Image (cartoon, rainbow, N blue to C red):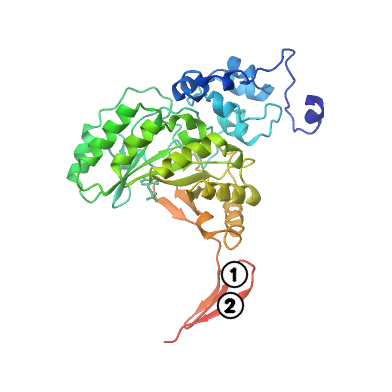
Amino acid sequence: MAQMLTNHLDPPAFTLNPTPLKNFAVEKLQPEWHDWKWQFRNRVTSLEALKQFIPVTAEEEKAFQAAGKNLPFAITPYYLDLINPLNVHDAIRKTVIPRMAEFTTTAAEMVDPCGEDGSMVAPGLVHRYPDRVLFLVNETCSVYCRYCTRSRLVGSGKHEVDFSAAYEYLRNHPEVRDVLISGGDPLVMSDDKLEGIIQNLRAIPSIEIVRIGTKIPVVLPQRITDELVNRLKKYHPFFMSIHFLHPDEITPEVEAACNKLADAGISTFSQTVLLKGVNDDPAVMKTLMQKLLKLRVRPYYIYQCDPVQGTSHFRTSIAKGLEIMEHLRGHTTGYAIPTYVVDAPGGGGKIPVSPDYIVSREPGKTVLRNYKGDVYEYLEEA
Ligand SMILES: *Cc1c(COP(=O)(O)O)cnc(C)c1O
């Protein structure tokens, strides 16, 4: 089997260990498997541990050993179990296992591509848009995505920040009516700590809505407990943006987590980063969006991969993103169509990019094309 696969792989392929691979067949039968704290404690965080489960290529091994890496490696047993160990092209594998390309920086790449540090008005608080803020409350994730746009911050193990200045800023800026809590991943915090932050925000009357940006329902769905959901639903209107990448991530566990959120009235929205060799395929993206909608997760954003240092191997052209959008609109449910955005390098914020359906415009007449390419005239009387 391995031999047959190897013949089809681009170099460098792996060689199978003489010792058989470990898997989680036994662990999955234990109640601990469903305990998010067990999953978090038993994360695979080293090359040695990973090699027991997956044959690692020589190139991946070198990437692990390369010095000076700031973005750590970690994966939950649950998420690792989704990877087909014998396929070096496995979509999930590519997003979590380090590659040597991470050490290559191109001229256009930056440490802080979205210019967040420049809009930081208090520790953790990024105020870019008129009426809403991004609130970065931690630097820890359960799984580290290799293309992370905040690799400058995450896993740095910095001390906990005192957020009193952020709350003070929000009290003094009543124009902020929407707080997006992110990190790191806010859902790796304990229920008490997370609820404390939300309570502090809710104590500010001008804040109308609170939302959390997270990948936890995908990489550690066990974290979405009844207890957590019962606490969060006290703070409505409360929303969640969930980072999904690929249809392989949609499992019964993820379905259960999304159902819990939806049943508690917590509207969920998806965010997907367009990644080369992972989801840069119209059919894959359409399947993902349709599956999300079935979970009552409303497709929200597809992001052009930010030019963060060491991510050139993940970046597609914008033309590829437009091609994907072209294959969604008209071809599937409008609810399943997210907005494709470029987070403007340097801090310009999210800018939507869309295929052009306008063929020509002149006073009184706009020529349009539909999803099939048929052309129509729309006339406006003066
Ligand atoms: C993405 C983002 C938001 C939220 O943007 P929406 O389009 O409202 O979801 C707010 N602040 C910053 C800095 C962001 O990057």
Image mark for residue 370 = 1
Give the residue pinned by disc 2: 376
Residue with the most extreme top position: 19
Graded by Cα atoms within 10 Å as few (under 14), some (14 to 19) or many (20 or more), the crowding at tag 1 reads few
The residue positioned 68% from the left and 34% from the top of the image is 89
Q: Is residue 114 visible?
A: no
Q: Is residue 377 above or below residue 333?
A: below
Tell me residue 84's x, y (percent). 67, 30
Quadrant position of the C terminus in the picture: bottom left
Counting from the top left corner in percent of width and height, residue 374 is at: 64, 73
Relative placement, left or right, of 246 versus 205 is right
Q: Is residue 85 left or right of residue 355?
A: right
Q: Are marks 1 and 2 in contact (CB under 8 Å)?
A: yes
Could you tell me which secondary element the residue under label 2 belongs to?
strand
Query: Would you call the spot at circle 2 few (<14 residues within 10 Å), some (14-19), or many (20 or more)?
Result: few
| Point 56% across, 61% down: residue | 355
Judging depth in this view, the residue of 31 and 105 nearest the camera is 31
Q: CA distance from mark 1 to mark 2?
A: 8 Å
Place of residue 105 in the rendered image (x, y in percent of width and height, measured from the top left) = 54, 35
| Residue type at the position of mark 1 | Asn
Q: Nearer the viewer, residue 35 or 119?
A: 35
Q: Quadrant of the N terminus?
A: top right
Residue 360's image quarter? bottom right
Badge 1 element: loop
Q: Is residue 322 above or below residue 29?
A: below
For badge 2, the amino acid type reads: Tyr
